[in-house]
Image (cartoon, grey):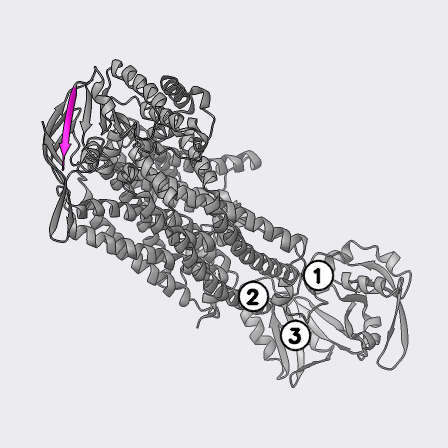
């Protein structure tokens, strides 16, 4: 038995995920039953009961979504905390890359949140419509989500069970430092170009939202995912740390940086998720989703404001911008 | 969010208070126990981390069997040869037993004019008027626990120590050490190094052990290996190891509590499920009426779901506040003894309120997820009451 | 305008079907005052429930104000009940622990109105139903007649075009019956469609009844 599983925070995390899975399992069973028996045009008592059961699935998914929404930052925070006892790790970056599950787990968690959000959106329009037009679509989507959640639960367990606190590992300084020398930025861009792109894409997202051009918005979102990520990693992040060569997406989640990473990454991914959901609603369901889009704009604006604030704050304090120091040898 | 909805929610919640109150009381008790235990363990964990922060990175001791013995001062020269080690501090300390009372003090000898390996000591000495201290040759600094002991036994400012050879040395209390982390320093007596050697009966050319710092963590592993290779009977302890040992100890205790708590939680969930499934004819009829008046399932679900959330928030807030008062104001009577074992009376943990969002969300998750999970089906069932019920 | 064609409502018990109403067709025009007459168990409450969107038919067609309500998802059927129908139940069915005011405001909660708008509408219908003076009393403390007037105010608050009453006079004394009939007359003048299901002969003497529908064992008898 690995002693880490007895760690209070990890135990709470795993217990929470497990209970959610059990409740979702019930919803999953009900969902399969509905898929088999659903016939909206029938007048039978069975059909009326089934329509009520559909609400059980809805309420369980809302509950799981809310809790998983809290559990994701909790997961990151837990990794941050156990980096104290894992030798060599100084933040979650070290812990998450400890074994093969870490990164996979992180991505599956993000994917599940996005899909749950899409499910809730479809469901919203489905129960407002007169004949439940998307009943089968959302039910099959849930089948898929549940499979992902089952995998997630296994990886949750496997990830923590596999961390050996006696093995020394690398931290962000080595993880990302290795990239120094080669140009780590995507598409062969340099720093100045990526920052210009960053603001241009932001402007593109805003204007296409109000101009109702969904395909341009979609392109903007797809571009913003790597550009936003790398801009924070290699430019804005250095201003948060006030260290020109510190390129870590995780350290900013720590107390030393006032947990700024949570609102920063939260608003970034929140914006992306909301945008994707809104586009799907308009293009696939042909429903107007103004509210989702406004939330997306709000979310991205918070993100860009936080990023810009740190640069301006640094400039205001020191009168200069940060210049990266060339490092000859990297540990 | 429409405020008429919340107004209605509160009204109907209040009118069903008889049903809610038992659930709330049960929940408060559970949250109270849970958060008390977590507050206590976090607080102690914090004290230890703080204390360890001031400890030297490395300690080198000489072992004879399973026992630490005094080490010759000459080992310093060998240690200094190792490239990563810049400065080695010899340390003199030991337990002084007061036989009739069954208590002991930790006597620590300090070279006041040298750099201290113990960062906490360095801070204290920096803030001290050394001229005044050395005006008398029998001055000592005492920890909080010792100070209390002296006051309780009417020693005034002087206390007499006996060397192993039977010679009496009377020391004068110069000042009391600040109480920031009692777990390590409460029973300490700090005196100049020669005096300490006399009290503890350590030979002139010997010391208790050596301490040194290595700033670069990446070098720790290699330093450990090199020092161990110096001699067959040397033992090297680094700070991270002791931290890990403590952390594992607390995780173990915490895990133990957690497993007990799990059993409580399961029975609580069953009670909740039962309680919420009980057929309250008026509640059922009321939902039926609301449905007949045009509330959709979505609306009644929202009402009932928020009602459950309200129970969660009310009991969470009250339970956590009570635990806060219990642990940090009353210093957790009874529970403390269960947690620590009653043997270490002298090393009392300080109850520094350490509360962060993370700890609060731990408590919230551990309580809210099982709670809502166990009431979600009953809540759904009552919310989907047929409007036809109202026509009966 | 209510249109009903070949409406059935039955309950399946094992292999047997028990019909509450069988093969009913009728139509009610806007603003009509209609009486469903029959002994208890004749199916008049079931028919009333289906028209009010509270119960669902087993087969057949029913449309109310051009909305086909025989097969609607809950969200729509509930909105239909909310906007088009005001129900006055036999046992009043107030939320006993709330005040008259809060009882009357209950149907407006899902509508997402502001507190001010709700206040305006509630006060208006309290006035029509003659119960303004009891607005802040707890429902359980009211007399039978007051309870019914509170129920009327609640039925009016969403400004529904159809008011259905299930055995409205069964628990009232003579004086309160007169008050109730007065209010009904007032509503009739406001051009609301009123459907009363009753076995009380007093209604048949009223001169403003447009249609009387007799039911026996779930079947129409003319």
* A119 and C55: which is toward the camera: C55
Subunit of mark 1? B
The range drawn in magenta is C211-217
Q: Give percent across and percent down for residue C7.
A: 11, 35
Neighbor class of circle 1 (other Cα within 10 Å; few <14, some 14-19, many 20+) is many
| Sequence order check, earlier mark of 3 and 2 | 3
Tag 2 and tag 1 share a subunit: yes
How many numbered tags mark residues here? 3
Residue position marked by numbered label 1 in the rendering: B182
- Asked if residue B264 is positioned above or below residue A208 in the image, the reply reads below
- Asked if residue A75 is positioned above or below residue C222 in the image, the reply reads below
Subunit of mark 2? B
Q: Residue B335 occupies which quadrant of the picture?
A: bottom right
Residue position marked by numbered label 3 in the rendering: B60
Q: Give percent across and percent down for residue A142.
A: 25, 50
**What residue lies at 18% left-to-right and 19% top-to-bottom?**
C30
């Amino acid at each position: 038995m690995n002693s880490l599983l007895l760690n209070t925070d990890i135990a709470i995390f795993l217990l929470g995920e497990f209970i959610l899975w059990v409740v979702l399992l019930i919803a999953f069973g009900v969902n399969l039953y509905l898929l088999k028996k659903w016939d909206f045009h029938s007048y039978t008592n069975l059909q009326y009961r089934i329509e009520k059961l559909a609400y059980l699935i809805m309420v369980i998914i809302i509950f799981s979504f809310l809790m998983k929404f809290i559990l994701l930052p909790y997961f990151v925070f837990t990794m941050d905390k156990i980096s104290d006892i894992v030798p060599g790790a100084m933040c979650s970056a070290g812990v998450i890359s400890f074994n093969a599950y870490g990164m996979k787990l992180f991505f599956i968690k993000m994917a599940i949140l996005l899909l749950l959000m899409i499910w809730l959106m479809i469901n919203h329009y489905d129960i407002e419509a007169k004949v439940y037009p998307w009943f089968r679509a959302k039910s099959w989507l849930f089948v898929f989500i549940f499979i992902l959640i089952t995998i997630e639960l296994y990886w949750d367990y496997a990830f923590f069970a596999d961390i050996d606190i006696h093995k020394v590992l690398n931290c962000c300084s080595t993880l990302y430092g290795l990239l120094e020398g080669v140009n780590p930025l995507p598409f062969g861009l340099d720093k100045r170009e990526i920052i210009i792109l960053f603001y241009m894409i932001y402007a593109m997202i805003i204007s296409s939202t109000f101009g109702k051009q969904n395909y341009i918005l979609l392109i903007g979102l797809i571009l913003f995912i790597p550009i936003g990520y790398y801009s924070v990693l290699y430019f804005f992040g250095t201003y948060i740390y006030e260290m020109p060569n510190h390129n870590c997406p995780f350290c900013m989640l720590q107390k030393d940086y006032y947990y700024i990473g949570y609102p920063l990454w939260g608003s970034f991914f929140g914006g992306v998720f909301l945008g994707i959901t809104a586009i799907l609603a308009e293009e696939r369901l042909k429903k107007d989703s103004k509210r989702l889009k406004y939330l997306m704009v709000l979310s991205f604006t918070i993100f860009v404001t936080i990023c810009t604030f740190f640069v301006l704050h640094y400039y205001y304090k020191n009168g200069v911008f940060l210049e990266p120091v060339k490092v000859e040898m990297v540990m | 969010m429409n405020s008429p909805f919340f107004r209605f929610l509160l009204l109907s919640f209040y009118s069903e208070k008889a049903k809610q109150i038992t659930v709330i009381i049960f929940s408060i008790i559970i949250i109270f126990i849970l958060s008390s235990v977590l507050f206590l363990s976090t607080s102690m964990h914090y004290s230890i981390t703080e204390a360890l922060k001031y400890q030297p990175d490395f300690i080198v001791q000489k072992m004879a069997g399973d026992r630490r013995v005094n080490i010759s001062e000459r080992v310093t020269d060998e240690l200094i040869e190792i490239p990563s080690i810049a400065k080695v501090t010899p340390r003199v300390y030991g337990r002084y037993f007061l036989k009739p009372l069954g208590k002991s003090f930790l006597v620590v000898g300090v070279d006041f004019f040298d750099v201290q390996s113990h960062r906490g000591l360095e801070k204290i000495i920096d803030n001290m008027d050394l001229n005044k201290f050395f005006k008398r040759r029998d001055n000592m600094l005492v920890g909080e626990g010792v100070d209390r002991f002296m006051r309780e036994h009417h020693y005034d400012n002087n206390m007499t120590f006996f060397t192993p050879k039977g010679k009496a040395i009377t020391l004068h209390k110069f000042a009391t050490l600040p109480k920031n982390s009692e777990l390590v320093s409460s029973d300490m007596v700090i005196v100049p190094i020669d005096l300490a050697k006399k009290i503890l009966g350590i030979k002139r050319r010997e010391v208790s052990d050596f301490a040194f710092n290595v700033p670069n963590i990446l070098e720790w592993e290699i330093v450990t290996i090199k020092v161990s290779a110096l001699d067959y009977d040397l033992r090297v302890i680094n700070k991270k190891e002791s931290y890990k040992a403590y952390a594992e100890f607390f995780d173990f205790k915490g895990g133990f509590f957690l497993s007990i708590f799990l059993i409580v939680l399961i029975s609580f969930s069953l009670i909740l499920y039962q309680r919420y499934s009980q057929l309250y004819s008026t509640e059922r009829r009321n939902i039926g009426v609301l449905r007949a008046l045009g509330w959709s399932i979505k609306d009644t679900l929202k009402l009932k779901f928020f009602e459950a959330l309200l129970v969660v928030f009310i009991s969470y807030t009250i339970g956590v506040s009570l635990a806060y008062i219990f642990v940090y104001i009353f210093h957790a009577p009874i529970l403390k003894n269960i947690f620590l074992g009653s043997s270490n009376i002298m090393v009392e943990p300080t109850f520094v309120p350490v509360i962060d969002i993370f700890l609060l969300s731990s408590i919230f998750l551990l309580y809210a997820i099982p709670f809502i999970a166990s009431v979600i089906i009953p809540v759904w069932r009552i919310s989907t009451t047929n409007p036809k019920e109202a026509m009966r | 305008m209510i249109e009903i064609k070949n409406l059935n409502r039955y309950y399946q018990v094992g292999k047997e079907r028990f019909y509450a109403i069988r093969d009913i067709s009728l139509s009610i025009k806007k603003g009509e005052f209609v009486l469903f007459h029959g002994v208890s168990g004749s199916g008049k409450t079931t028919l009333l429930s289906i028209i009010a969107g509270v119960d669902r038919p087993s087969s057949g067609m029913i449309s109310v104000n051009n909305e086909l309500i025989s097969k609607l998802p809950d969200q729509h059927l509930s909105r239909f009940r909310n906007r088009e129908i005001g129900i006055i139940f036999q046992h009043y069915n107030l939320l006993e622990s709330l005040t008259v005011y809060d009882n009357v405001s209950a149907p407006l909660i899902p509508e997402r109105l502001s507190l001010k708008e709700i206040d305006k509408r509630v006060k208006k219908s309290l006035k029509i139903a003659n119960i303004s003076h009891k607005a802040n009393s707890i429902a359980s403390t009211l007399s039978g007649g007051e309870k019914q007037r509170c129920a009327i105010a609640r039925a009016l608050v969403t400004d529904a075009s159809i008011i259905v009453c299930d055995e409205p006079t069964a628990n009232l004394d003579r004086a309160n019956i007169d008050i109730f009939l007065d209010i009904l007359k007032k509503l009739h003048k406001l051009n609301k469609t009123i459907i009363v299901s009753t076995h009380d002969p007093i209604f048949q003497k009223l001169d403003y009844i447009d249609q009387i529908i007799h039911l026996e064992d779930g079947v129409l008898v003319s």
